[in-house]
Image (tube, rainbow, N blue to C red):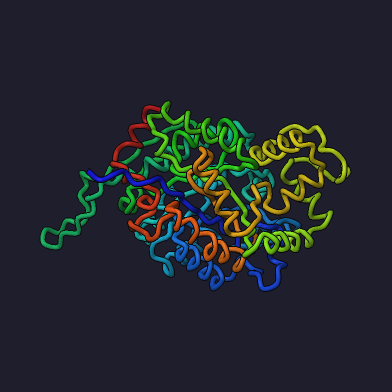
Amino acid sequence: MSAPRPRQMHLGLFILGTGSHVAGWRQPGAVTSFEDMAAIREIGATAERGLFDLIFMGDNLYADPAAHPSYTSRLEPLTMLSALAMSTSRIGLGATASTTYGDPFSVARAFASLDHISAGRAAWNAVTTANAVSAANFGRDHPDHSQRYAIAEEFVSVVRGLWDCWDDDALVADAASGLYIDPAKVRSLDHDGAFFQVKGPLNISRAPQGQPVILQAGGSAPGQRLAARTADVVFSVVQDLGEAQAQYAAFKAQLPAFGRRAEDVTMLPGVMPVVGRTEREAFDRLAALQGFLSDSNALQLLSDRFGTDMSVYDLDGPVPDIALPDSYHSFAGVMLAKARREGLSLRDVYNLMGAARGHWVLCGSAEQVADTLQHWFESGAADGFNVMPPFFHEGFSDFVDLVVPILQERGLFRAAYEGATLRDHLGLDRPARGVWPARLAAS
């Protein structure tokens, strides 16, 4: 009997065309447009060369010219990833779609289509849409936090139920008999819930993965519950090791209540690595990026993340005592806790947020970055990482070319893709049909 395989990291790429640093696009030679498909194809090729599990594209539903460039001008994610599926062959493709401003049938159909187009590499990032300004684009009032998550619970269950309305072998296409679809193997969902009434079935056969992978990033208690019940991959916002270890343990402890094991969900903290061939080179690069920032950038970003007008506060003064906002719960909670714990000024908080919008910034030589990622991975803080390059292409290719080989040499990361689907990369079983309609009926 062969020995069990050592645990290995999973790596996702969080793709913003201009990079995760709010001013990364100003770096000489950086990608300056998130509408440049040639640049996006190059990013995809680099990620696949680095053997990443998946590319994940976030999204928003409004335009603010003062915000991060990639949040203002971008391609629609499912359209973009369908195009990217044609220039990649193995890497997973994840996109955001809102449970507050979408509908279950359209979301289920779109991601099933992407799974067919990509031969089993699709993933849906199910989000509730934090920012209330999105509501005006849909002629609706923005639901409060608890209502958004109540809607999301039902929405995700309906989507997964729709994905299971077809048996794997329902599409027969038997020319001899003339039978194209076996009607006994396609069922309606007949869902009648508090928020949605959906008959089904989908007008597309069962996805190559059985069901596309579900991604989630909610940090609040309702968000964690939704993720524990339904997610395959969870993105988290952390700033230090102890916090990450506590968050990791607390989340994994919730899974048995939903009949799930710790290994059923991959937890990936977000990290913006600023990598150099030496430590000095890395810190010089970060200093150059920070030099592009201004006080107006700071106040705009802080106001957005904290859900209140921060222009009335002194950037060099202490962090004010403000309540957690209804939006960006996890970002605000992590940053306020860190500020109070470490006595940070408002400018200190901004420098952290401005660098990576509230995510962890890891700056150092390739060896130092690899050492830190290994320590987190081996000390119960992560199953891998959602890598958020500060800019493209060099800010990402340096990670792939300098850090990934060190992780591979240490046996911490794959040396080749061993499967064809995203579920294969994540070590997840292909789900049997019928599980989710049954869970939906029982919920």
Percent position (x, y) of residue 236? Answer: 57, 42
Q: Is residue 338 above or below residue 390?
A: above
Percent position (x, y) of residue 9? Answer: 46, 49
Residue drawn at point x = 80 percent, y = 32 percent = 321
Residue lying at the far left of the rendered structure: 176
Residue 394 as seen in the image, left or right of residue 66: left
Residue drawn at point x = 40 percent, y = 39 percent = 264
Percent position (x, y) of residue 168? Answer: 25, 49
Pick the residue in front: 191 or 208: 208
Percent position (x, y) of residue 170? Answer: 23, 50
Pick the residue in front: 97 or 181: 97
For the question of whether residue 93 can be seen, the reply is no
Residue drawn at point x = 45 percent, y = 45 percent = 214
Pick the residue in front: 361 or 331: 361
Tell me the quarter of the image containing the C terminus. top left
Residue 439 as seen in the image, left or right of residue 273: left
Tell me the quarter of the image containing the N terminus. top left
Residue drawn at point x = 64 percent, y = 41 percent = 240
Q: Is residue 120 above or below residue 337?
A: below
Pick the residue in front: 150 or 13: 13
For the question of whether residue 178 can be seen, the reply is yes
